[in-house]
Image (tube, rainbow, N blue to C red):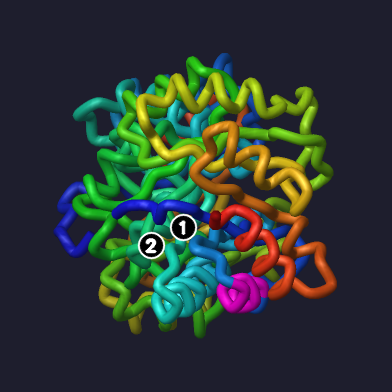
C-alpha cells in the first residue's frame, strides 16, 4: 500500500464465492488460465465459506502459479492470509476492518477496497489505498445485495474526486467498458463472465480489446 | 507476553453484545477476554476489539481475538486464539512476531506437540465435559486425557475448555490445567459478573 504499482492490471476477475474445498476447485482452474494469459489480471479470491486454513492452501497454490508474472492474486479481506500465502494483494470489502488501521500491517501488499455508495467511496480518500472498486454501476444479480445500481454519472463523479485508480464493477460486460473508461475509470471488475473456464482466455481478450493501451 | 498463574478466560458468545459481556466478565475478575463472533463483519470485530482491549487494559487483563490474525494485527491485540482449521500457529507467529500470545485449540497429544513446535504461547484443550456452546461431533475428552495432553505440551500453559462449571473446575486444575475458558457458563448466566467471580474463585487456590 502507498507504493506505486506502475503495472496495475486493468481487469479484475472476482472468484465465484462457491468454493467449499481447496482441491479441484473452480478458482484453481480460473487461476490456471489467468496465469497463462498474455494480459494481466487482478484475481480477487473471495471465498467466504472456506476456513482460514483452506483459504491459505488455495491462496498459496494460486500465488505460486502466478509467481512473478504480471497477474496479481488479491485475497478478499484477510490480509493475514494474503501475507502468509504469498499473495501480492488484499481487497477490503466495504464492511472490513478499516483500511487505514490495517495500513501498516499490510506491508507491501497492493490494497484496494470496495465502495457501494458515493459517501463510502469518498471516505476512502485518506486511507492510503492503491485502488477503489466502485459499484454496482449497472444492474447485476451478484451485486444486487449491495444496493441499487450507482450509474455511470456517479462513477464519473467518484473518478474525478479520487486520486487513485477506480475500477467499475456491477454488470460490466465488455461492451460497457468504453463508457466506464470515458467516465474516468481505470479498469473494470466482473465475476459471472469468467465462470466458464473454457471461454475464460477469450473473455479476458475481449475485455482488453475495449481497454486503453 | 505471559499468562498469569491461574487464568479464567471468558469467550464471547454469538448472541450477547460482546463489549457489554466483556465489561461484566472483567468486573467479575476474568484475566482474559476472547472475542469470538463468527457472524460479525471485519469492521464490527475491529471496533469491538478496540473497545474491549481498552477495558482489558484498565483491569490489567489480556485481550485476544479468535481466528482473525488480521484484526489482531490492525489493532495490536494481546494475541489470537486459533482452531485447527484457522491459520497455522507457525504462520500466525511469523506475522505477529515473538511477543503476542498465540493460543491453539488441541484435542490430542500430537496436536499439543505440534502447537509447541509452532511456537504457540498456550494450548486450549477441549472439550473436557459435554457442552452445548459449540457443535461437537466428538466425545468429551475427560480429565485423564487432559492430563495426558498437558504432559505432552512441553510445559506450555494449558487452558481447559468445554462444559466447565463450578462443580468441575477444581478437577481440571488438578489434572494439570493452568486455567479454564468458558462461554455459556458466563454469557448464559443471569448474572455474568457473579458467575465469573465464582468461577475464578474456584480455580485461584
Circle 1 sits in a helix, a strand or a loop, which is it?
strand
Please name whichever residue, A20 or A71, is drawn nearer the observer in this view of the structure.
Answer: A20
In this picture, residue A39 sits left or right of residue A54:
left
Magenta residues (range):
B21-28
Residue B104 percent location from the top left of the image: 48, 37
Evaluate if marks 2 and 1 touch, with contact meaning CB atoms under 8 Å apart. Answer: yes
Which quadrant of the view contains residue A126? bottom left
**In the depicted structure, whether residue A11 falls above or below residue B58:** above
The verdict on residue B22 being magenta is yes
Which quadrant of the view contains residue B128? top right
Residue B179 percent location from the top left of the image: 54, 47
Circle 2 sits in a helix, a strand or a loop, which is it?
loop
Q: Which mark is residue A26?
A: none
Residue B127 percent location from the top left of the image: 69, 34
| Residue A170 appears in the picture as rendered | no
Badge 2: few (under 14), some or many (20 or more) residues near its Cα, within 10 Å?
A: many
Badge 1: few (under 14), some or many (20 or more) residues near its Cα, within 10 Å?
A: many
Please name whichever residue, A129 or A198, is drawn nearer the observer in this view of the structure.
Answer: A129
Quarter occupied by the C terminus of chain B = bottom right
Please name whichever residue, B202 or A123, is drawn nearer the observer in this view of the structure.
Answer: B202
Q: Which mark is residue B77?
A: 2
Which chain contains the residue that carries disc 2? Answer: B
Q: Main secondary structure of the magenta part?
A: helix
Residue B98 percent location from the top left of the image: 22, 45
Q: Which mark is residue B64?
A: 1
Q: In this rendering, do the residues under marks 2 and 1 share a single chain?
A: yes
Which chain contains the residue that carries disc 1? Answer: B
Amino acid at each position: 500500500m502507498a507504493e506505486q504499482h506502475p503495472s496495475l492490471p486493468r481487469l479484475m476477475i472476482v472468484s465465484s464465492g462457491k468454493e467449499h474445498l481447496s482441491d479441484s476447485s473452480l478458482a484453481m482452474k480460473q487461476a490456471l488460465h489467468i496465469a497463462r494469459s498474455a494480459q494481466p489480471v487482478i484475481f480477487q479470491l473471495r471465498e467466504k465459506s472456506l476456513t482460514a486454513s483452506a483459504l491459505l492452501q488455495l491462496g498459496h497454490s494460486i500465488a505460486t502459479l502466478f509467481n512473478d508474472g504480471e497477474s496479481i492474486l488479491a485475497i478478499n479481506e484477510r490480509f493475514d492470509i494474503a501475507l502468509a500465502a504469498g499473495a501480492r494483494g488484499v481487497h477490503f470489502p466495504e464492511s472490513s476492518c478499516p483500511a487505514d488501521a490495517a495500513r501498516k500491517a499490510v506491508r507491501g501488499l497492493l490494497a484496494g477496497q470496495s465502495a457501494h455508495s458515493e459517501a463510502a467511496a469518498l471516505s476512502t480518500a485518506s486511507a492510503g489505498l492503491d485502488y477503489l472498486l466502485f459499484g454496482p454501476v449497472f444492474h447485476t444479480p451478484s451485486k444486487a445485495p449491495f444496493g441499487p445500481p450507482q450509474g455511470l454519472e456517479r462513477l464519473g463523479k467518484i473518478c474525478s474526486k479520487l486520486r487513485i485508480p477506480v475500477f467499475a464493477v456491477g454488470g460490466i460486460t465488455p461492451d460497457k467498458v468504453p463508457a466506464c473508461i470515458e467516465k474516468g475509470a481505470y479498469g473494470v471488475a466482473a465475476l459471472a463472465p469468467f465462470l466458464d473456464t473454457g471461454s475464460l482466455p477469450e473473455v479476458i481478450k475481449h475485455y482488453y480489446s475495449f481497454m486503453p493501451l | 507476553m505471559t499468562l498469569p498463574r491461574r487464568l479464567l478466560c471468558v469467550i464471547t458468545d454469538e448472541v450477547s453484545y460482546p463489549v457489554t459481556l466483556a465489561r461484566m466478565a472483567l468486573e467479575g475478575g476474568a484475566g482474559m477476554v476472547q472475542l469470538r463472533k463468527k457472524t460479525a463483519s471485519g469492521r464490527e470485530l475491529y471496533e469491538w476489539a478496540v473497545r474491549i482491549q481498552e477495558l482489558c487494559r484498565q483491569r490489567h487483563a489480556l485481550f485476544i481475538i479468535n481466528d482473525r490474525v488480521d484484526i489482531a494485527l490492525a489493532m495490536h491485540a494481546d494475541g489470537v486464539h486459533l482452531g485447527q482449521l484457522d491459520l497455522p500457529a507457525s504462520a500466525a507467529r511469523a506475522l505477529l512476531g515473538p511477543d503476542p500470545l498465540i493460543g491453539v485449540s488441541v484435542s490430542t497429544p500430537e496436536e499439543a506437540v505440534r502447537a509447541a513446535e509452532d511456537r504457540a504461547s498456550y494450548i486450549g484443550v477441549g472439550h473436557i465435559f459435554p457442552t452445548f456452546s459449540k457443535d461437537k461431533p466428538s466425545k468429551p475428552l475427560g480429565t485423564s486425557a487432559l492430563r495426558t495432553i498437558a504432559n505432552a505440551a512441553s510445559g506450555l500453559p494449558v487452558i481447559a475448555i468445554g462444559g466447565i462449571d463450578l462443580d468441575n473446575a477444581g478437577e481440571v486444575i488438578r489434572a494439570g490445567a493452568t486455567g479454564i475458558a468458558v462461554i455459556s457458563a458466563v454469557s448464559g448466566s443471569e448474572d455474568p459478573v457473579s458467575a465469573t467471580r465464582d468461577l475464578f474463585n474456584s480455580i485461584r487456590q
